[in-house]
Each structure stands twice: as C-alpha cells, then as structure tokens.
Amino acid sequence: GQNIDQPTEMTATEGAIVQINCTYQTSGFNGLFWYQQHAGEAPTFLSYNVLDGLEEKGRFSSFLSRSKGYSYLLLKELQMKDSASYLCAVRDNTNAGKSTFGDGTTLTVKP
Amino acid sequence: GAGVSQSPSNKVTEKGKDVELRCDPISGHTALYWYRQSLGQGLEFLIYFQGNSAPDKSGLPSDRFSAERTGGSVSTLTIQRTQQEDSAVYLCASSLGQQGPSYEQYFGPGTRLTVT
C-alpha cells in the first residue's frame, strides 16, 4: 500500500515563495502528481513527476527524489488566488489505475 | 470540449435508501475513476475502470457499494441501504489512458451526498 504525508496547513504572503513537501512510503511507484483544489471545487491537475528532478511550469515547479520518497511543490510569486488545498498523489505500479492521495495541504495566502 | 460531468450535483437521502450517482467522462477517455472525499480530507480511491472492466474493486468500502460502466463511457456508482457515514462528496475522474502523462486525471464537479 501507500502512505503519504504532507503538512496540514501553511500560510504565506502574497508575492513570496512557498514550498509544500510530500513524503511517501510505497509498495510500488509509478509517478507522483500534484493537484490544486479550491474550496468546494474539484481538484485540477498541476504536475506529474516520474523521474528524479525538477519539473517547471510557469510559477509552479515540482521536484521528485524517488530514493528519498520525497517531493515538493514550489509556488513562486504567490497570488491571493493560490489559496487552496494542494494534494499530493502517488500512483501504484502494482495496480495501473490506482492513485493514493494525501490529505492535502491548505495554503492561505495573505496580503 | 466538454469536461467530466456528474449528476446529481446534490443528493439528500434517508438512511436505508438506495442512491445512484452518474458520471459522464470526457469523450475518448478510456479510464474512469471514482473517489470519495469527506470534509477536510483527501481523496479516498474507490474503483477505476479501464474500458468497461474494473480491475480493482478493493477500494469499495463495503458490499453495499457497486459500480458499472457501459459502452466505455457512462459510469454509475450505486450505494445500497445508505448509512450516515456514506455522506461525502463523490468525485469522478477520467483520463485519456494509463501511460505516463496520459494518466492525468480530469475531475468532475462531484456529487454531494447527504444521508439523514
């Protein structure tokens, strides 16, 4: 099975940089995903990592270290609209369709 | 094109009644997923379909839960004899495929189920 840990809450200031960490213990690994979920809305895809290293996409970047079971999501130039829950999800390679989600990190961006 | 749609958006039912939740995936997406999300929690995997078959049903919480998919498109999640602990938002997602980035899941708006 999978066990995923991420901080419950974080607060940051508009314009700043914030890093949201995710650690996982898995029986198999076939990719790590980050999703953004605004309150009352469905999750939307942010990033996908399957190899070690940094993937950059605009203001958002995601890093993966498979040997350490560790990923982070980096948000730059924070905007108020970035206030949301950020979900880390790991895909199981023993079951092609199954992803296990963490409980999410609620990020509050303050002026 | 149209995204994933789910119906109803809200459902209030009495304990012991059966409910059916519907999901229309994005056209052409072969994989379809059902999740459950309780307030303030992450997503709990329930079941996924590749085409019309469900290789893994282990996430279904009990035998009161069942799901089917027909024609490689619409899926229905049925909960029999609902209990109050079934109250949650039920999210459906679909993906183009199962390989690499094609596994990116697109979520529907969810069905909020309240069992009274």
Image (cartoon, coloured by chain):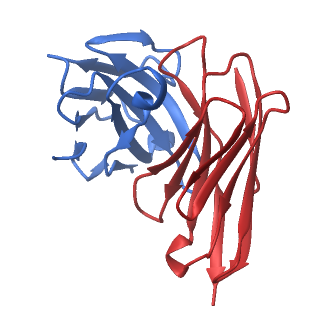
Q: Which chain is blue?
A: B
Can residue B2 be seen by looking at this rendering? yes
The answer to whether B33 is drawn above or below residue B108 in the figure is above
User: On the rendered structure, is A66 left or right of B53?
Assistant: right
Q: Residue sitting at 58 percent across and 59 percent down? A: A60
Residue B70 position (above or below residue B14): above
Count of numbered labels shown in the rendering: 0
Q: Is residue B31 left or right of residue A48?
A: left
Q: State the image coordinates of residue B10 (x, y, percent, origin top left).
A: 28, 54
Tell me what residue is drawn at x 35 percent, y 31 percent.
B95
Residue A18 x/y as whole percent: 72, 67
Q: Nearer the viewer, residue B11 or A25?
A: A25
Relative to B29, say whether A101 is above or below: below
Q: Is residue B112 left or right of residue A87?
A: left
**Residue A72 sits above or below residue A30 on the image:** below
Q: Residue at x 70, y 26 (%)?
A: A2
Q: Quadrant of residue B67?
A: top left
Q: Is residue B43 or residue A90 the one in the foreground?
A: A90
Residue located farthest toward the bottom when viewing the structure as drawn? A111
**Where does the image place residue A24, in percent across and percent down from the top left?**
76, 34
| Chain seen in red | A
Residue B101 screen position, x and y as percent: 45, 31
Most extreme residue toward the right is A68
- Residue B41 in view of the camera: no
Q: Quadrant of residue B71?
A: top left
